Image (cartoon, grey):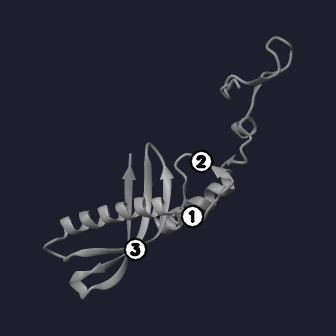
Amino acid sequence: MDMVKPEEKQMGAEGSGSKDKQMADDEFYNDGLHEMTDEEYLFFRSHRLKSDGFDVPAMPDVFSCGMIQPYDIKGEMERIEIGRFAQLAIDEYNRRFEKKKGKLEFVKVLKAMCGVVAGVIFYITFDAKDLADGGMIKTYQSEVFRG
């Protein structure tokens, strides 16, 4: 099947007197997704700002570049991947604050969000033991970029 780029697929013929109109991506791809409306953008933006990207509701039928969505960590591969990123954040924390705040030890990932940009930004919420506070389990958040 030949794939025609959206900018090449036009409705109407040149010189036929009809105005050439390009199909919108929503019509062309017909994948059930639509570009984010202004109202949806305001909803998304308010949640993004309130939570710094760590708690944005799912918008399953919407597409927008850079949009942050919940990342499913139910599968083993996804849990392993996000667990590694959480460990990376803990390692960096321990390196930076080794002398001041003690050390953290990874416990588990609670949830993850992701935004696709020129790579993927993961917004990870996880539990870790604060070894400087008697091993108390506390919740932390970190952004990790995979590019």
Q: Which residue is mark 3?
A: 108
The answer for how far apart the CA atoms under marks 2 and 1 are is: 16 Å
Q: Residue at x 66, y 52 (%)?
A: 62
Residue 53 seen in the figure: no
Q: Amino acid at mark 3?
A: Lys
Question: Which disc, if any, is residue 64?
Answer: 2
As drawn, which residue projects farthest toward the right? Answer: 17
Disc 1 packing (10 Å; few <14; some 14–19; many ≥20): few
Q: Position of residue 57 (x, y in %)?
A: 60, 65
Q: Position of residue 77 (x, y in %)?
A: 46, 59
- Counting the numbered discs, the total is 3
Q: Amino acid at mark 2?
A: Ser
The quarter of the rendered structure image containing the N terminus is top right
Q: Position of residue 135 (x, y in %)?
A: 27, 85
- Picture layout, residue 107 above or below residue 30: below
Q: Which of labels 3 and 1 is toward the front?
A: 3
Q: Position of residue 23 (x, y in %)?
A: 74, 31
Question: Which disc, if any, is residue 46?
Answer: 1
Q: Secondary structure at mark 1?
A: helix
Question: Which disc, if any, is residue 79?
Answer: none
Q: Is residue 62 left or right of residue 52?
A: right
